[in-house]
Image (cartoon, grey):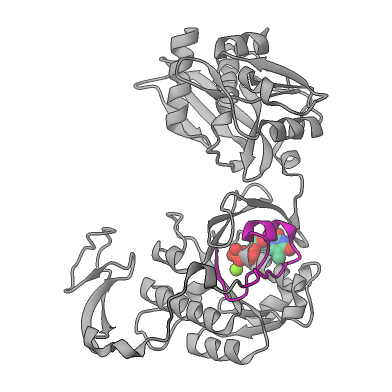
Amino acid sequence: MKTKKIFVCTECGAKSPRWIGKCPECNSWNSYVEQTETKSSSSSVSRQQSDSKIYKLADVPTEENYRISTGIKELDRVLGGGIIPGSIVLAGGDPGIGKSTLMLQMCGGIKEFAPLYVTGEESLQQIKFRAARIKGIDEEMLILAETNLEQIIYHISSSESRVIIVDSIQSIHSEKIEATPGSVVQIRECTSALMQLAKQTNKAIFVIGHVTKEGVIAGPKILEHMVDTVLQFEGEKTYSYRILRAIKNRFGSTNEIGIFDMSDAGLREVSNPSEIFLSSREVQEPGTSIVAAMEGSRPLLLEVQALVTPTSYGVPQRTSNGYDSRRLQMVLAVLEKRLGAQFQKNDVFVNITGGVSLSDTSVDLGVAAALISSLRDQALDAMTVIIGEIGLTGEVRSVANLERRIGECEKLGFKSVMIPQNSISKLSKKFDIKLLPTARISLALSTLFG
Ligand code: TYD
Ligand code: MG
């Protein structure tokens, strides 16, 4: 074994053989600290020493993919069906978003696995006080108030618990390392130790991490590569609902989202998300339209808001929240070219309500309709949903999962839905809701605005 002195950036984890004042990777100043790196020299691995074995694919023993249900359907779905023993999950999100609440509630649903909640941030009393507010918390659940990694590892290994929650990774530290708790070096070391522990003991470990202002979990991206699953808890301060997303999942899809509502008695599951994203639907203001996007395997009806106002000075602004701004530029260009709509002297703002961010191009047509609605100050029908991708020539292109989207519109009581013309023949089901097939953006808008 060889030891070597190196310098590591506490902000981004970049390494350097000598101290530098400004990190070339993340541009932070005075962030390098000295560390000792142990390297096993290549000669120390002798050829006879391997414990591993080469298998033929056919001979690989199949393990049953056993999953522990958390008792929270929305959480199970995002995890890919439940908790996998021996896996490590990083649960990130802004402070105050509800990470601790969600994890405490999860403990209530997995009593038979003797969940252990390790708190490094709050005292035992604080946890007890919080648990008293939340419905369905198990009085038998185990709590440990500890910030020392070695102590935590000792307790985890010697306990009966099959599922452990560490709240939070920023608050714990290993005594083997000099860096301060919360620094990149500590976070990385603690995560890696917990990961090894999870694999060795076949216990599932949930690690809570605060997201930095840049939106990166626990600072460095490296953490995401280390763990099996990365969950992100999102929400707007002004709304009570929260969205749980898997941004990485070795054991499932990353498309699924779980939706919760933060109430006085903890997080409530929202099984019909469209209802909360659509406000009262009797009247529709000019500049708004309803679209049907897909979030994972679920359709989600959302309101698009657009505002087109004369530019007061300089270059017209294009601002978009929740909808790709390059996509917005394209939709504007198509509307200008194919319909002669005038946006050159206007500022344009687009917002997907509820703070939802969409990567689904099926909302193009709805965005275009909202833009024209604001430009003409003419409201669209409140009971019509608009589905379709827009192509550069002004054609309305087909979208995936159309039947499921139409089904959701029908379920929520909408009267009609605009869909791409060329998808009509592919529909195998009969719908009661009125379908408005359309092939071109110009036809779509004349149908919608009469
Ligand atoms: P918390 O789970 O502590 O967030 P995090 O661990 O992500 O920092 O949630 C904190 C917020 O949630 C706090 O502002 C209070 C609120 N809250 C409720 O509204 N209802 C509840 O039942 C609980 C437990 C918390
Ligand atoms: Mg917390």
The residue shown at (41%, 26%) is 317
Using the image as rendered, state which of residue 62 and residue 362 is in the foreground: 62
The residue shown at (60%, 84%) is 145
The residue shown at (47%, 27%) is 328
State which quarter of the image contains the C terminus.
Answer: top right
Residue 269 in picture, x, y percent from top left: 75, 55
Magenta stretch, residue numbers: 63-91
Residue 338 in picture, x, y percent from top left: 47, 10
Residue 70 in picture, x, y percent from top left: 72, 67
Q: In this view, does 400 lie to the left or right of 276?
A: left
Please tell me whether residue 355 belongs to the stretch shown in magenta.
no
Residue 303 in picture, x, y percent from top left: 65, 31
Placement of 99 over or under 86, stated as above or below:
above
Placement of 436 over or under 180, stated as above or below:
above
The residue shown at (26%, 89%) is 44
Using the image as rendered, state which of residue 73 and residue 187 is in the foreground: 73
Placement of 221 over or under 111, stated as above or below:
above
Q: In this view, does 211 lie to the left or right of 447?
A: left
Residue 125: name its quadrant: bottom right
